[in-house]
Image (cartoon, grey):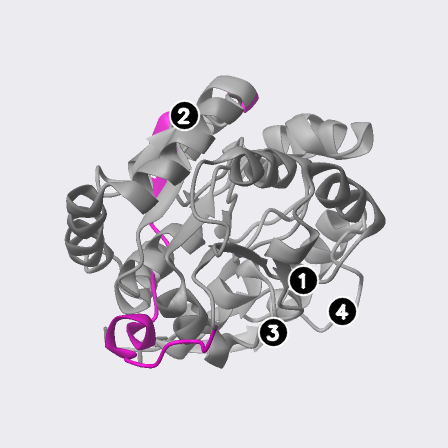
Amino acid sequence: MNSRKKILVDSRWAGNTGIGRLYKEVMKYAPSEASFEFVSSKMGLGSLLSPLMLGEEIMKSNAEVFYSPSFMPPAFSKKPFIFTVHDLMHLFYYSKLHKIYYQQVIARLAPKAKKIITVSHFSKSQLVELLGIPESLIKVIYNGVDSHFLHNEEEFESSRPYFLYVGNRRKNKNVPAMLTAFAKAKIPHEFMFFLSGNSDVELESLITSLGIEKRVRYLGFIEESDLPKIYKGAHATLFASLMEGFGLPIIESMASGTPVLTSDTSSLPEIAGGSALCVNPTDISAIQAGIEKLVNDRTFYLDCVVNGLERAKDFSWEKTAAETWETILS
């Protein structure tokens, strides 16, 4: 390109979240032919007035294109805009207000976009089927995995083998089902279940009723720099979610050489690519059988390690960023 294209970016998404991670990596690999302005408003990310604010920011900006790493499009814009819809979880697991926002705001504004980025073909199909967004407007760009996971040799120190869950505790994450299956699994009692985050009353009540108080450990907030060794130290990662737009823990675990048990629904088989053990997340006995297989079937376990490492190589943040900038600048 002969001249640099000025991009207005919704930088409010910077931070320690999944969307914040995408934003960080996309900006890290920004090409030299782009220059930037950033949204100046400090309006909260959850504000229903964000689309109006973004329209005003675009109107007063000298930028040629607007980009958001998440689901807030501008209410009006004479300039091309690109935004990212990671999933449609809000239609199923959030409040009625969230559902209305997606159906009445995103669905109405999305057709005006230059392009909508999403993170899996599953999410693309939902955008088309549930919000009526034209298929031609949607570009699938997978998330990446940091090379630190592939290159790390350090393991988290634990005196007992452990299964690992990394993520929040929202309903779609299906954590109670995984804990129940773990408690029922016919495996040596030395196996632990490690979870990111801290204890909560509801989960503690379940753990007590299952009689596994001494087999569950909370890891609290996990620093990004500590994640590779925590994955690598695990016997396997459990991620039997009911619905995901992508499922980053799958490829982070695979890149660490740690097998994954995940779901056979939503985007998860797509991301696993045949290299994880996929089970029905609504069937506790199926999750239980999967846990038992990962402990008792050594040949299958080692196949998961090898295949997972190969699958993880298909994903990189550099590739994610390159495809994103190609979409923005084209």
Check disc 3 and report the residue beneath it. Answer: 38
**Residue 266 in sight in this render:** no
- Label 1: how many residues lie within 10 Å, few (<14), some (14-19) or many (20+)? some
Is label 1 in a helix, a strand or a loop? loop
Q: Tell me, yes or no, whether the highlighted magenta stretch contains residue 153.
A: yes
Q: At x 84% / y 49%, what residue is drawn?
A: 201
Cα gap from disc 4 to disc 1, whole angstroms:
31 Å
Tell me the amino acid under the disc marked 3.
Phe
Which mark is nearer the camera, 1 or 3? 1
Cα gap from disc 4 to disc 3, whole angstroms:
9 Å
Q: In this view, does 248 lie to the left or right of 111?
A: left
Q: Which of marks 1 and 3 is nearer the N terminus?
A: 3
Check disc 2 and report the residue beneath it. Answer: 125
Label 2 with label 4: CB-CB less than 8 Å: no
- Label 2: how many residues lie within 10 Å, few (<14), some (14-19) or many (20+)? some
Check disc 4 and report the residue beneath it. Answer: 41
Cα gap from disc 2 to disc 3, whole angstroms:
31 Å
In the rendered image, residue 308, in percent from the top left (x then y), is placed at 22, 52
